[in-house]
Image (cartoon, helix red, strand yellow):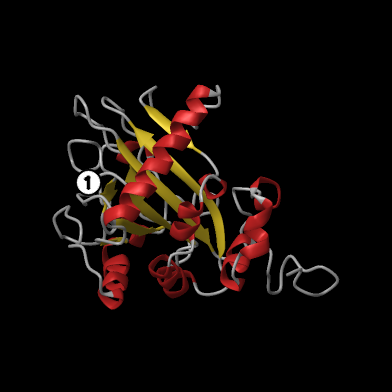
Amino acid sequence: MTTTTTERPVVLPEPTRDLAQGLRNIADYGLTIVPDVLTGDVLKASRDVLYRAAASDRARGREQKFSLDYGHDDSNQRVWNVLSRDPLFEDMAFHPIAIEYVRAVLGWPALLGNLSANVTGPGGGEMILHADQIFVPEPWSTEPQGINVAWCLDEFTEANGGTRFVPGSHKLNRAPLPEEAEVETAAIVAPAGSIAIFESRVWHKTGHNRTPDQTRAGVFAWYTKPIYRQQENWALSLRPEMRQFASDEALTLLGFKTEGLGLVNGKSPA
């Protein structure tokens, strides 16, 4: 059964800060890793605010587990709409490196569809193998319709269930079949503060956290071409000051400033 278009062993690209090399990695593997984007006090503060948000949800009875038959258990917590939780999450969603890749891979304008977090505890189970653009009818275009920018707030390792990929699978232009669920994958291995950028056709899944004591947290920013409806209804869920003080670029990504679609009386509403 053929599941990739290359004879390369199942390995992931080396981390790089070079945009051109990163784009080649995405074209070849379906993903790239950028190291040391968050460092020092900023990394610590970003991690702290995420874990506080997760603890707040639990304390108030708002904790949400994974669903959609993705095979998760009670060790995995989803934290939705982190964009409204703290300005540090705004810095992630609209970070210059992330937006460079959005512009290069998807073009402009683009939309921020969602910004949520996954917190996986010891023993956390695997997600089923999938691709993110399942909302697009097959056969898929040879261009991705979205990209994910995953912020590693803890170290991602093989042992603690770092996201696993089938490199090159994006070239098949389809989702994995049920009988391909156990195809060989490779895990992201990246220090805390790295980001993993992967296009919407590449097959991937959350790994199994086999450690006895490690928690792994990541923030996932999902961007699409502007023709797709956003997963999060920003008009209802954002703090009011977000719209008041957002840049033109951020307003475009949130869907408040638009071109061609979503007009009000023939003009962009912002």
Residue 27 occupies quadrant:
bottom left
Residue sitting at x 32%, y 72%: 23
Residue most extreme to the bottom: 20
**Residue 265 image offset from top left, x and y in percent:** 86, 71
Residue occupying image coordinates x 68% and y 74%: 259
Where 178 sits versus 107, above or below? above
In the rendered image, residue 95, in percent from the top left (x then y), is placed at: 43, 65
For label 1, the residue is 187
Which residue is most to the right? 265
Residue 175 percent coordinates (x, y): 41, 49
Q: Nearer the viewer, residue 19 or 141?
A: 19
Q: Is residue 52 left or right of residue 35?
A: right
Residue 111 picture quarter: bottom right
Q: Quadrant of the C terminus?
A: bottom right
Q: As rendered, which of 117 and 29 lies closer to the eye?
A: 117
For the question of whether residue 70 can be seen, the reply is no
| Left or right: 240 as drawn, with respect to 26 | right
Q: Residue at x 26, y 74 (%)?
A: 18
Q: Amino acid at mark 1?
A: Ala
Q: Residues within 10 Å of mark 1 (few under 14, many from 20)?
A: many
The residue at the point 66 percent across, 49 percent down is: 233
As drawn, which residue projects farthest toward the front?
41
The answer to whether one can see residue 185 in this image is: yes
Q: Is residue 208 above or below residue 150?
A: above
